Amino acid sequence: MYNKLSSVVAVVAISFLCLIICSFYVNDMRDKNVLGTELQLCCSDPVTGFYRNGMCVTGPTDFGTHIVCAMVTQQFLDFSKAKGNDLTTPREEYNFPGLKHGDKWCLCISRWIEAYEAGVAPPIDLEATNENALDYITLDILKVYDIKIQN
């Protein structure tokens, strides 16, 4: 009887400890932006993000890595269309409304960099651009395209 009771107490204690440790871990795992603060909403009208939650978050099924919150320009939309990705035409099957100049949208980091290299990168919202973008491009470059500076 004592062994069974001590085993149950040990399992409960370990579970409780895991719960406490996991809660700290989860709180530290909130997505951050390129400025190192909590990732902000990019846009809810139209609803953006790979997961259509308004946030530029990524995960294992997001092969495009949609982590740059950009305010698209007509120049960028034309560039993207010429590269084979028409962002202006609605695609109902992807819950995609089609974009127009001035819309905010979570762009693929690789397309934003292509646009940057071609001189047509749209301005971005640094507070809503995922910190993972820093794995691909420097903060100094991103700051040049900050919406707050562009407007």
Image (cartoon, rainbow, N blue to C red):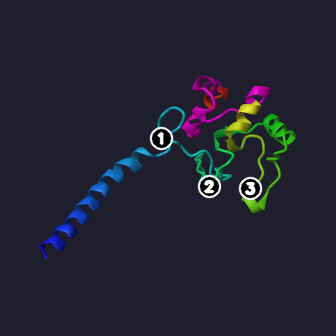
Question: What residue would you read off at disc 3?
Answer: 96
**Residue drawn at (87%, 39%), measured in percent from left and top?**
82
Is residue 133 magenta-colored? yes
Residue type at mark 2 is: Tyr
In space, the residues marked 1 and 2 are separated at their CA atoms by: 18 Å
**Residue drawn at (21%, 68%), measured in percent from left and top?**
7
Question: What residue would you read off at disc 2?
Answer: 51
User: Toward the viewer: 11 or 132?
Assistant: 11
Mark 1: few/some/many CA within 10 Å (<14, 14-19, 20+): some
Work out which residue is located at the far right of the displayed protein and give it: 82
In space, the residues marked 1 and 3 are separated at their CA atoms by: 26 Å
User: Toward the viewer: 45 or 106?
Assistant: 106
Question: What residue would you read off at disc 1?
Answer: 38
**Marker disc for residue 1:** none
Contact, mark 1 vs mark 3 (Cβ under 8 Å): no
Q: Position of residue 60 (x, y in %)?
A: 60, 51
**Residue drawn at (78%, 45%), measured in percent from left and top?**
100
Q: Position of residue 26 (x, y in %)?
A: 41, 50
Q: Is residue 88 left or right of residue 6?
A: right
Residues rendered magenta in the picture: 116-144
Mark 2: few/some/many CA within 10 Å (<14, 14-19, 20+): some
Residue type at mark 3 is: Phe
Quadrant in which the N terminus appears: bottom left
Q: Is residue 124 above or below residue 18?
A: above
Q: Is residue 64 left or right of residue 53?
A: right
Q: Say whether disc 2 or disc 3 marks the residue closer to the N-terminus.
A: 2
Q: Say whether disc 1 or disc 2 marks the residue closer to the N-terminus.
A: 1
Foreground disc of the pair 1, 2: 2
Residue type at mark 1 is: Glu
